[in-house]
Amino acid sequence: MSTASLHARWSPDAGEHEHAMFGVEGIHCAGCAGTIEKAVSRLPGIEIVRVNAATARVSVEWRGGATTLNAILDAVGRAGFTPVPLAGREAAQKFSAERRAALKRVGLASLGMMQAMMYLGALYGASDIDASMSQLMRVAGMVIVTPVLFYSGAPYLVGAWRDVSNRRLGMDVPVALALLLAWVPSVVNTMRGSGEVYFDSVGMFVFFLAAGRFIEMNVRHRQLAGDEALARTLPAQVTRLDDAGERQSIPLAALAPGDRFLVRKGGVVAVDARLAAPADVAVLDESLLTGESIAVRRRAGDPIRGGSVNLGSPLTLVAVSAAGNSMLASIVALVARAQADRPPLARAADRAASWFVGIILVLALITAAGWLFVDATRAFPAVLAVLVVTCPCALSLATPAAFAAATNALSRLGILVTRADAIERLARVDTIMLDKTGTLTEPVCSVAGIELLSNLSAARALAVAAALERGSEHPLAAAFRGHEDSLVVASDVREFEGEGVEARIEGRRWRIGRRTFVTSLAPQAQHTVFALHGHEATSYLGDEAGLVAAFDVGAPLRREARAAADALRKLGISIVIASGDSHRAVASAARALGVPVAHARLKPDGKIRLLDELRAKGNKVFAVGDGINDAPVLAAADVSCAMGQGSALAQSAADLLLVEEDLSRVALAIATARRTMDVVRQNLLWSIVYNAAAVPLAALGLIAPWLAALGMSLSSLGVVLNARRLATVQPR
Amino acid sequence: MSIAYLLVLLGMGILAAAIWALFWAVDNDQFEELESQGASILHDEPEEDPP
């Protein structure tokens, strides 16, 4: 793939700052990440370069015009790594190739190790073996283990060579040093026909290393598979219907808003769309986007999100966005940004790990010197054990592995993490600030109560109101949708701006809207209305004889709101409601949720002032709101979550996005973040304790080289598998 | 004891054959996808595209 087409694929933002993101082949440990960061940051105009070792992703920002993407890719290449594009077919091929190579390495190492141990085992403890026979076993061991070392152990040898030629100490250096230190004297002794050989130890060490890396690779691929799956499921081609109704296959990128296209049963809807025919009903699986596996029904007028799978009959859809602008594409981009970012905690661990390698080399030298004085024959195994047993990898993998697993688990719950350090901040919050409209309440109004003022039935009153409001765009009009009666039809509909609607039904004039507007239709009549308790607005319905009904209209609380509030309280989080709504509406919502602190009539700057007050008291505030109206508040909070619909959500500046409009997932996100930090702490503690205990034992000659190899592989595997526990979060 | 030479050679020959078989299997997609193949027996005939 040429760099020109890479450039197009990564489509950096035009203008002052350019940004690109790509994957890198050959990253094993955080040391490699440092090498790439150093190589790229030497270029002119580079502002930020971040390399995430756990996800093998690079994110670069640079001043427009100062350098080019090609130069950056070249720099990465010169440092000894292969840049690859992220999503799509190439990424899948890259995974597959990486997996095959790793499988072959593990396979060769395991077969070779077993056979070599069988031959060389004959040399242990058998004192009466004759010289020609033991020489045969040495030669056989050399013939088997040498290809194991240079084929299965190649990643370590190459990695160490890369580190040395870049004049830095990576984590492969001690490992490669140990392998060669064991192999070279063994070959020399085999040629001489006498002395110790360590081929069995070399074989076993390579096998443990290759197996450990293979399992790590599988975990990493599985984590990436989640969001790569989003991008990869998009078809490369779509079937467009032209004006004459003829089908033509076009590339996805050529599909423009307004085009009609076909989606077969089981096919993926490639872009945000709507149904072409009003009578159609689509049955869709949106689990890729929301994590919700129950099929949803979409009728004419409902948005159909790109990335949903068509479960019903073949559909004809009209595209409402271009492929690059769909919600799916924006979400993929946001999640990719978070994955390329490395949280500060992980960067601190990387720096520590780099120091650690230097210390290990010094310790190995001291061990060698010490044993040469005490017992020269034991110096060699002790040095090998020190080099092998230490595992800076566990230290540098501890944090990113946990964050990657948590990000992945959250995205399956419909919670997308858009910033790498969001989880760390989320784990520390103790106060949540909730917006009311659209967050605690449903985004659409409904009728909460009816007061009948004549002998008209409630159903009839609703049907009349629905007929009157049918054409209105007013937000309150939406409350009557679904109450229509096909026998009640309004004619001569006139809308009075800010007042209400007037229309003729069965020869009588009706009005709906503000009280004064409706009563002015029958000025002589006596009007008595009992007080309605509840929501934000009251709509009146009347005819020429006077008022007929009063409707209590408002957005009802979300069904899960109470349970979500309880779950948050259980986590020890205090809830604050901050809303722009009336005191009455906010107080009723607060009462229903059992929340003591509710602030009403707040403009955005008032919300920010409230936020500052809370933070001044030392609270860590988590703001939840809808993406657009609350953007300033979301940006000012310690950590923020946006919920809402469609592409507006993806444009928000929040740290977390709630794709599924389900409040109870907010508490779930906090709980997951806290568990993640627990796992990070466990991982860091484990790698520190392991190294602190293993190094002195190895230096004292108490750990055999093979045991050291096993311990090193298990300690780094333990970290990855511990992080893997986070992937098993279940909704509810 | 010269039989030992033969047996060592034989063992290495079998090892080489096993490695060749593994590499052949990896290169021929035998390890590409281990999960869905087991479930394939539960699926009906593949769905046709709509005409």
Image: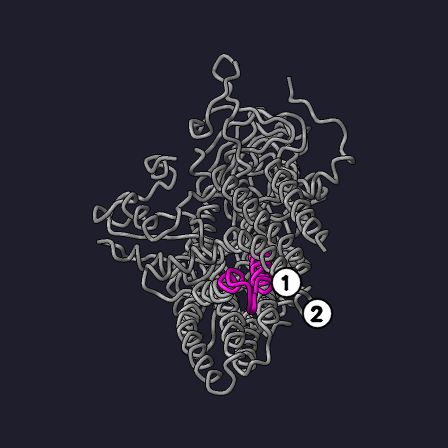
Q: Does the magenta stretch include residue A190?
A: yes
Q: From what the image shows, is residue A529 above or below residue A636?
A: above
Q: Which residue is drawn at 69% across and 59% down?
A: A118
Sort mark 2 into few (<14), some (14-19) or many (20+) by Cα contacts within 10 Å. Answer: few
Q: Is mark 1 on a helix, strand or loop?
A: helix
Q: Position of residue A359 (x, y in %)?
A: 41, 76
Query: The residue under label 2 is which amino acid type?
Result: Asp
Looking at the image, which is closer to me, A673 or A513?
A673
Looking at the image, which is closer to me, A678 or A52?
A52
Q: Which chain carries label 2?
A: A
Q: Give the range drawn in magenta.
A: A186-213
Q: In which quarter of the image is residue A562?
A: bottom right
Sort mark 1 into few (<14), some (14-19) or many (20+) by Cα contacts within 10 Å. Answer: some
Drawn side of residue A69 relative to residue A31, left or right:
left
Q: Position of residue A506 (x, y in %)?
A: 64, 28
Q: Is mark 2 on a helix, strand or loop?
A: loop
Q: Does the magenta stretch include residue A687?
A: no
Q: Residue at x 55, y 25 (%)?
A: A276
